[in-house]
Amino acid sequence: MGAELEGLSRDARAVIDALLPPPTQSVEEERDRRLAYLAAGFRLFGRYGFDNGVAGHMSARDPADHDRFWVNPVGRPFSMIRVSDLLLVDSDGTVVKGDGQVNLAAFAIHSAVHRARPDVVSAAHTHSRYGRAWSTLGRLLSPISQDACAFYGDHALFDRYHGPVMEATEGEAIAAALGHHKAAILCNHGLLTVGGSVEEAVWWFLAFEAACEAQMLAESVGEPRPISPEHAAATARQVGSPEIGRLSFLPYFAEVTAREPDVLE
Ligand SMILES: [Zn+2]
């Protein structure tokens, strides 16, 4: 908390504090929480149609061994992923827990991002429809709506495409382009989001994809009026804060776990 919340009123802060779950009390509890959120995030991605063959992956850093992260097994549909399906991968790309294969691109991208950004707990990348289409334009998103302001001054462009990401050096280049931001548009490829929690990475991905869709819709019928830089920056400090990212994911988590309790198996 602190600087990110400077744009929020005291009442808003009180509401957020009351709604966010209390901090976990042990490494095991924190791991269980991250894996539950990660598996539920995949169910959401499945519903939104973010699968594309065997492309797409999301990771969560292990709370005990920070060089290792949990990721989806290649070939498992997002809509069927359970906590027990998730793989723990070490810094060499070896699966040290779980049954399955890790996607080479997943390892190249996620290992580089986790290494470059110690503050990042989770990263998400898919070839979602609107993100993929927007990524062909080589442009950052504009602050044309309140929701889009979450990414104002906080997303980057990875402005080259050299084929599928299979090499560590390409993952490192993506991590460098991401910089300190929460999201990146990978040109001619798709979207990438990160967060200091799994909740944030998932929510920012849903929001980033929706912002691409909204700007494409608006530009297809006219010339959208951007929000002024001053108001976009102030709005970004509110709707783009980590706390709002975490909070925004929680209703979805409640709904997914209620309707599809096997996600936690
Ligand atoms: Zn990809």
Image (cartoon, grey):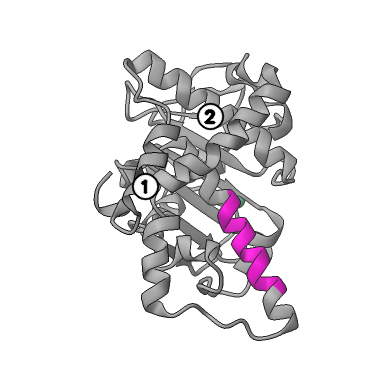
Quadrant location of the N terminus in the rendered image:
top left
Q: Is residue 256 visible?
A: yes
Using residue 24 as the reference point, say whether residue 165 is left or right of it: right
In the image, residue 215 above or below residue 1 = below
- In the image, the segment drawn in magenta is 206-217
Q: Secondary structure at mark 1?
A: helix
Identity of the residue drawn at 37% across and 67% down: 234
Please rate how many residues cluster around mark 2, counting C-alpha atoms within 10 Å: few if below 14, some from 14 to 19, many from 20: many
Identify the disc placed on residue 37: 2
Question: Reading the chain from its start, which is encountered first: label 2 or label 1?
Answer: 1
Within the image, what quadrant is residue 209 found in? bottom right
Q: Is residue 108 visible?
A: no
In the image, residue 265 above or below residue 123 = above
Q: Amino acid at mark 1?
A: Asp
Within the image, what quadrant is residue 233 found in? bottom left
Task: Give the number of callouts.
Answer: 2
Q: Amino acid at mark 2?
A: Tyr
Using residue 226 as the reference point, say whether residue 154 is left or right of it: left
Identity of the residue drawn at 66% across and 30% down: 255
Q: Secondary structure at mark 2?
A: helix
Using residue 179 as the reference point, say whether residue 131 is left or right of it: right
Whether the magenta-drawn stretch holds residue 210 is answered as yes
Q: Main secondary structure of the magenta part?
A: helix
Identity of the residue drawn at 46% across and 62% down: 151
In the image, residue 58 above or below residue 205 = above
Whether the magenta-drawn stretch holds residue 85 is answered as no
Residue 51 image offset from top left, x and y in percent: 71, 43
Identify the disc placed on residue 11: 1
Q: Verify CB contact (< 8 Å) between mark 2 and mark 1.
A: no
**In whole angstroms, how far apart are the C-alphas of marks 2 and 1?**
27 Å
Q: Farthest residue in the left direction?
A: 2
Residue 198 image offset from top left, x and y in percent: 47, 36
